[in-house]
Structures are given as C-alpha cells and as structure tokens.
Image (cartoon, rainbow, N blue to C red):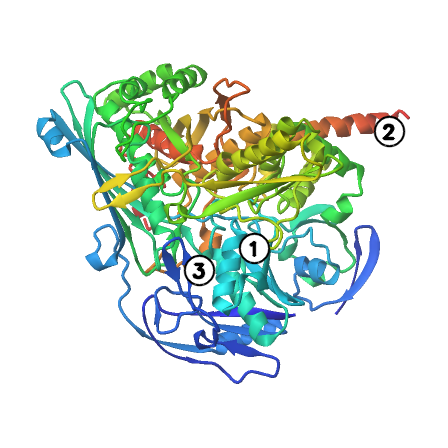
C-alpha cells in the first residue's frame, strides 16, 4: 500500500512557474500534471476542474503535485520540502459588484410586463439579502482507495454519484469504462457535499495506483478538508418589488449573484434552481430575473442542501415578511393573497399543474405555534420599544413557506437516461439494483415497502445488491430528493412490470425502468422554457426567538414545521430528516460562516467554525398534512432549508427592529467594537 | 515505549511513541475501527472512548497516559448489558444515528446513565453535545436515552431481586 499526499498552491491566483521537489527516496514518486495519461480535467455538469494545476492556479490550496510513497510521515516531510513557485497576481475576491469577465454563467428571464407593472406600481420596495458559505461537516473523512483487482482498477470512496467517479477516473487514466470498478463506501449525511469532489480524490488515488502499480490511498485530514474542499456558494439577492395601492405584489425584479469560487462547480444547476424559485411561495404576475454565477479566487463553492433554491427562497420569503411588516399586516394574511396555486404562471411561462397547500399549512402552523397571538404581542412591544426602557430579552416570531421541486432534473443531464433494475427470484425474494446511494436506512425502508406492497411479498424479502458500477445500472446522482421522487418511482414501475408478467413467465423475472427528464429547463436568451420538476412538496416554518438585549445574540425558543409531502412512508424517518435539516438550517442562521481571509480559509478555520451544539438546539415540532394511501411519495428533506432561514430572519427582524437581511444574523456585531475597551 | 493497558477487558501490550494518539493506536495496532479518527482536535467527538471510566476523545490522549489504564471502545461496550439497553432504547425511539457517530454517542450516553440514572432532557443534550454530527435528531436522542434509562432501571431491579 502506498499513501498519497497533496502539494497545494500557496497563492490564490497566478502563473505556476515551477515545482521544485526534493530528491525522493526509493519507493517514493512525484506525480505532476504532465504525468496524467488521460485528460487532466474533471467534468461536472458543465463545469471543468483540473485534476492537477498545470500552468495557472486559481485558489490557495489547489492541488499542483501528488507525492506517493509507503510512509505517511515521511510523505508529510517531503511535502513540506517541496517549493511551489507561483508568479502571483492580485486575487479576484470581489463578487457582488463583479467584472464581466468573472461571470461564468448568466441567466435571465422575463414573464408578464415588468416595466409596465413598475410604472403602474403605487410603491416600490428594494432589499438585498445575503448568505454566507457553510461547511457540510459530513462525519466521514474525505479519502479514496484504489486497488488493482486482476484486470480492473477498483476505486472505493464515499460518493453520492458512483458513476461520476467511474467516468472521471476513466477519463483521467485514458482507459475503458469497464476497466474501472467503483465501490462506494458508507455515507453519513452528505448535504450534497459528496456530489463531485470524491471524484477528484478518486482520480488522485487512481493516478498513484496506476503509475506506481501499487494499491494507493489518499486521506485528507479534517483541517485539509475544511480548508480546501468545496463549500456552499455565497449569495447576494437583490429584490425590487412593486406594490399596488392595496399592498398587492404586482411585480418583482431580482438580481441574483452566486459566488461559486474557483472553477464554479455546478454553477448552472445552482443558478437555474435559484432563478426558478426566486418568488419563493409567492405567485407574481410580472417578473424579471437576472442571475449571475461569478468566479472568484477562493476554494470552489457550490452545492449544499437546498441546491441554489435556498438562496433565493430566503430572499423572497424575507421580502414578503418585510412587506407585511411595513404595511402592518399579518404576514400570513398578506401571503395568503399571493400564494402559488394550481394554475399560477411559473417563471418558465408554464402554469403550475398541481395544487399547493400553503393555506392549509399556514392554518396548521398558526394553531400549533400560536402565531397570531405571539406575532401581535411582539409587534406591539416592538412599536413601543423606543418608549419603554427594558432590559428584557426582545422576542420575535416569523413565518415563511417554501416548496421543494421534486425530481428537478439537472439540465445538463436532461439527455441522459437513468435506470433501476428489479429481479423477482425463484424463492420470491426481490433484488433491486440501483446505484442510488441511500444516505440512511429510511430511504431503503421506503423502497422496500414500495416494492413489497406492489408484489405482495414480505418487506424482508426485498434486498439491495451491493452498489458496484459493474453490477448495478446507473441511477444518476443521489441529490435533489431523487431517491424518493425518481428512484422510488422507477422501483414502482419495474415492480409493476414484474407483477404484470408474474404468472405468465417463469421466475426469475427482471424488469428495468428507465427515467428521462420530460421537460427540463431550457434557457434561450432571456426566455426560459420547460416544466422542470415531477411534483412539488410544500412546507411552512415558524421560528420564535429572543435576542440578548446587549449583544443581540439570538436564542431560538422553538421551531414549528408543517409539511405536505404527499404520502409519508415512514413518519419516524420523515420527522428525523426534517429535524436534522432544520437544525442545519438554523446553524446557517445563527453561527455557521466559513471564515475567508483574503480568499483563504485560515489554518485554525475548522476549530474556529461555530456550530450549534445539541444542547443549544431548540425544540422542533413537526406536523404533516393528512395524506391518502394513494398519494405519491415526495421528497421532503430539503424543505427546512427553504423556509427556516426566512422564518428566522423575520423573527430576528421583529425582535431587533433591524432588517435581518444577512445570514448568519449579525445582530451581535454592535458590541464587537467594544472588545478592546 | 512499551505500552501495557487493559483494552475491552483484556490485558494488551504494544509499542508506541509517548506522544502517539490513543485513537491511532486503537485503530492501527488493534484494528478497532469503531473509534473514528477524524479531526484530531477533540472537536468532533467521534473518537470517544472510556478511559478509566471517563469518556474522553481518544485523539487527545497521548500514549503515555494510557499506561496501566483501562480503555473501553464501542467494540468492548457492545458486549455489555448497558449497550443492549441503549440499543433497544434508541431503536424504540427512532433515534438512528449514522454509523460514524453511533459508537461515540452510545458511549457518551452510557457515561451519563452511570452518573444520572434518570437524566433530564437538557442533561442528555449537554452530554451528547460532546459528539458532533449532522445526523442528530435531538428529540429522538432524548427519547432514546430516557427509554434506555427505563430499561436499565428495570434490568437492575430484576437483577437485585432475582
């Protein structure tokens, strides 16, 4: 076994002039970009990233050289002795007011007549909402193992997309797909942080194994992982809303800027989802959106749960609360006049084909959280605050809504097909072959119960052959609730097909169900077309908090979530998924912020990164709208990311009388300047 | 240096440098992979072990501190009745920690139940805060530990009156 360590760029941006490696002892090898036998690039849905930087570096910490050898301790010494010479250029770090050459991708869309609507508006309100970068903090370490097994190179790593790993390794080594076998290792809660980066590490390990002809392992330390691997993109969403005399929202103009760091991985997906959900739960008859994915010289920033949509949903729902506050209306009542409903026109020009349930969700939340009474009394206190001198902690309560677009196909994958194969064996056991990665046992329980119900066999007879790219079909990336919205449907279809042949053909009977995106988003200039999701699941959240009267540090007192997720296959797993997502979303609101200093994450960044501990988590009450057994299953895991931040922001705004338009909430900053006193 | 200690109830011995981390010794020399060795700074708590009856992050324990001590990892803890109580309590309550944090969580919960046989919710959350993982559902974990506490109390009652 040899170990692999990464030599990284010391500069954020510049020309890579030379890499001076020390004399390497016998058994050790340096691997340069020139040594890559295939292509020195990793393709991820329209973005390209070098496996090893060759001429230029785009962020501090970018891999420029691999060192492979038997002793990890000696490798670390050798790594420290390598001199990487970069002719530095000024790093590009500004992103909200960007230069045109920073734009990786631009998306625009108009619906209705925004100009005329603004001209007719009785009032116009403008606000900007910003979110910071957040770390995924998955529990498993980042690493990969590559081992030769006869005529195949076997690659093991924790990934959400095994076939992407295979295709990248194949391309980097310049070999045939069947020469690479990927065996995914267990995943914790990946938060979409394992979508593509494991492929980079797999390529590094595979390169070392291929060139040294020995099994190779790469394992990043937690500090290395924190400082140099992708995080959540930063966002700035500026909204300009036109209102009629009754306070009705008639027009919305949005400028979305996503800082996607170096190489802008997944920029298209993030930006398109952000544009798609720019109105949040609201229906706006006249709409104009300009979206930009911008490149900077920070480590790559990209996907996180909520995939782009969370950025714009936070902005839209926060704006809705602000409009209601300024008009002195109940935020729920104001929203109820604007909710997306069946037939509402989407940004694509298509009409929403299914009914939404925001009104019912609002009613349930109002009752469970006592929203109307609390909101009314906190609002009264807020208005009288200047007249009353009090050292009591000010309180606030906020509400927000959101929807999850189930099975929203990645536009870049629209032409591809993904499948699941089921086989009913002679002993009436059912094998379901899929490369989809079940993050927890809950997903498999859902798949098992779906298949068992259709075929009338005990759930215990349903099993899943180990995922291996040689043995299971490509089911696509496990992201955007595809495991429920797409994979479960494919399992359903394949089992229905088996049931149709059950007493006509001898066992074993196999059936493969194939998924193709029906009507994906298509951007043509300033026009976007398509109906880009299979179904919607709706959600609302109420957050109640109090602020420290001196530092304005928030303490969340309670979170109430109500979900319409179609049929809930396992209430236990659903509650658990929603609760963990709500806590991660609150982490973003209160504390989690990737420290970036001059484009770099500092060495002690991981230790300084603030997270909510279990002891600080508030009670999270979860309820579901009633469902029928015939209702479809829908994804729900991302819903809290779409409405909890905006509910928090509304509550913080009410408690602080500030516009809580930036996450994490910065109410605590007024005291920061007093540290030195 | 030669390191003699009691590991999961057995006398063991190995060679180690004085500053080697206990987490690495347990994984590399004894193949106890239930001990996760991740942040190496005590932050994540995934490497919790019981050292002389106290749960500590093994990544912060240098080898010389282990000499003559008793170490219990999740692999050893799995052989005990206390483990069965917790596993059953978690199962009944729908607390399903992921396989990366499960061992550390169970050891932290067990140490709490040793000290406080009937812990309050906040005590449970504070003790389990030593382990960080995105998979945690606080309400389910509280129910899990409290259910385990009931099972444990019942087991001890029957043992005392057998």
Q: Mark 2 points at which residue?
A: B159
Say the numbered circle drawn on residue A141. Answer: 1
The N terminus of chain B: image quadrant: bottom right
Q: What element carries label 2?
A: helix
Seen in the picture, residue A516 relative to A87 is either above or below; the reply is: above
Q: Is residue A446 visible?
A: no
Which secondary structure lies at badge 1?
loop
Where is residue A575 shown, x and y percent of the image?
Answer: 54, 28
1 or 3: tag closer to the N-terminus: 1
- The chain holding disc 2 is B
Q: Position of residue A201 (x, y in %)?
A: 51, 62
Query: What element does badge 3 sit on?
Result: helix
Distance between mark 1 and mark 3 Cα atoms: 13 Å
- Is the residue marked by circle 1 packed among few (<14), some (14-19), or many (20+) residues within 10 Å? many
Above or below residue A135? Residue A80 is below
Q: Along the horizontal axis of the image, is A403 left or right of B74?
A: left
Q: What residue did someone put label 3 on? A: A228
Same chain for the residues under marks 1 and 2 in the image = no
Taking the image as shown, residue A7 lies to the left or right of residue B21, namely left
Q: Which residue is drawn at 22% across and 54% down?
A: A98
């Amino acid at each position: 076994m040899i170990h692999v360590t990464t030599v990284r760029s010391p500069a954020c941006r510049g020309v890579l002039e030379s890499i001076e490696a020390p004399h390497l002892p016998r058994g050790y090898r340096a691997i340069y970009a020139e040594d890559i036998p295939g292509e020195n690039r990793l393709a991820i849905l329209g973005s390209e990233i070098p496996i090893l930087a060759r001429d230029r570096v785009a962020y501090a910490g970018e891999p420029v050289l691999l060192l492979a050898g038997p002793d990890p301790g000696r490798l670390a010494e050798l790594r420290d002795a390598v001199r990487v010479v970069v002719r530095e250029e000024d790093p590009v770090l500004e992103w909200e007011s960007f230069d045109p050459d920073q734009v990786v991708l631009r998306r625009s869309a108009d619906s209705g007549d925004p100009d005329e609507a603004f001209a007719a508006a009785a009032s116009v309100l403008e606000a900007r909402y910003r979110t910071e970068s957040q770390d995924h903090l998955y529990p498993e370490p980042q690493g990969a193992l590559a081992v030769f097994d006869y005529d195949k190179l076997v690659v093991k790593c924790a990934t959400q997309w095994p076939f992407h790993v295979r295709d990248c390794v194949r391309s980097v080594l310049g070999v045939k797909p069947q020469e690479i076998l990927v065996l995914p290792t267990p995943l914790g809660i990946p938060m979409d942080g394992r979508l593509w980066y494991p492929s980079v590490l797999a390529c590094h390990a595979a390169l070392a194994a291929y060139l040294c002809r020995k099994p190779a392992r790469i394992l990043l330390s937690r500090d290395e992982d924190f400082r140099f691997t992708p995080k959540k993109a930063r966002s700035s969403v500026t909204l300009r809303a036109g209102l009629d005399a009754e306070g009705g929202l008639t027009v919305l103009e949005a400028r979305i800027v996503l800082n996607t760091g170096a190489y802008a991985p997944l920029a298209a997906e993030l930006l398109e989802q952000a544009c798609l959900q720019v109105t949040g739960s609201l229906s706006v008859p006249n709409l104009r959106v300009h979206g930009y994915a911008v490149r900077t010289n920070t480590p790559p920033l990209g996907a996180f749960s909520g995939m782009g949509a969370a950025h714009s949903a936070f902005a839209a729902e926060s704006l809705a609360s602000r409009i209601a506050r300024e008009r002195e209306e109940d935020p729920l009542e104001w929203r109820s006049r604007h909710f997306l409903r069946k037939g509402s026109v989407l940004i694509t020009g298509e009409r929403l084909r299914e009914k939404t349930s925001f009104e019912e969700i609002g009613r349930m939340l109002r009752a469970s959280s006592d929203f109307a009474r609390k909101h009314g009394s906190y609002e009264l206190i807020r208005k009288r605050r200047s007249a009353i001198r009090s050292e009591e902690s000010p309180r606030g309560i906020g509400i927000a809504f959101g929807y999850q677009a189930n099975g929203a196909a990645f536009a870049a994958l629209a032409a591809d097909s993904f499948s699941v194969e089921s086989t009913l064996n002679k002993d009436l056991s059912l094998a379901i072959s899929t490369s989809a990665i079940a993050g927890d046992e809950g997903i498999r329980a859902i798949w098992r119960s779906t298949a068992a119900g259709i075929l009338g066999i005990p759930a215990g007879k349903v099993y899943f052959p180990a995922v291996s790219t040689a043995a299971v079909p490509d089911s696509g990336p496990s992201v955007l609730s595809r495991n429920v919205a797409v994979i479960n449907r494919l399992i359903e279809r394949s089992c229905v097909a088996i049931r149709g042949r059950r007493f006509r053909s001898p066992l074993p009977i196999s059936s493969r169900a194939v998924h193709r995106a029906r009507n994906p988003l298509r951007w043509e200039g300033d026009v976007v077309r398509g109906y880009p999701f299979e179904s919607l699941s709706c959600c609302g959240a109420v957050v109640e908090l109090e602020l420290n009267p001196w530092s304005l540090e928030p303490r969340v007192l309670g979170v109430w979530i109500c979900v319409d997720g179609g049929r809930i296959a396992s209430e236990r797993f659903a509650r658990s998924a929603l609760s963990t997502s709500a806590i991660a979303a609150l982490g973003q609101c209160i504390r989690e912020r990737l420290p970036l200093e001059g484009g770099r994450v500092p060495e002690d960044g991981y230790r300084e990164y603030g997270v909510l501990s279990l002891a600080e988590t508030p009670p999270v009450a979860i309820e579901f709208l009633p469902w029928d057994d015939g209702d479809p299953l829908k994804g729900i895991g991302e819903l809290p990311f779409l409405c909890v931040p905006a509910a928090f922001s509304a509550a913080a705004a009410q408690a602080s009388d500030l516009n809580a338009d930036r996450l994490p909430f910065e109410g605590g900053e007024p005291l920061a300047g007093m540290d030195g006193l | 240096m030669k390191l003699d200690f009691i590991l999961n109830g057995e006398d063991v011995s190995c060679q180690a440098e004085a500053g080697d981390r206990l987490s690495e010794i347990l994984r590399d020399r004894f193949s106890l992979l239930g001990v996760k060795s991740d942040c190496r700074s005590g932050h994540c708590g995934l490497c919790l072990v019981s050292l002389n009856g106290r749960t500590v992050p093994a990544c912060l324990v240098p080898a010389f501190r282990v000499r003559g001590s008793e170490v219990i990892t999740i692999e050893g803890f799995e052989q005990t009745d206390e483990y069965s109580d917790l596993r059953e309590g978690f199962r009944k309550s729908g607390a399903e920690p992921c396989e990366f944090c499960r061992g550390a969580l169970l050891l932290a919960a067990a140490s709490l139940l040793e000290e406080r046989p009937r812990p309050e919710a906040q005590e449970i959350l504070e003790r389990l805060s030593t382990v960080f993982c995105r998979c945690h559902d606080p309400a389910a974990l509280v129910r899990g530990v409290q259910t385990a506490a009931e099972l444990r109390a019942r087991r001890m009652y029957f043992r005392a009156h057998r």
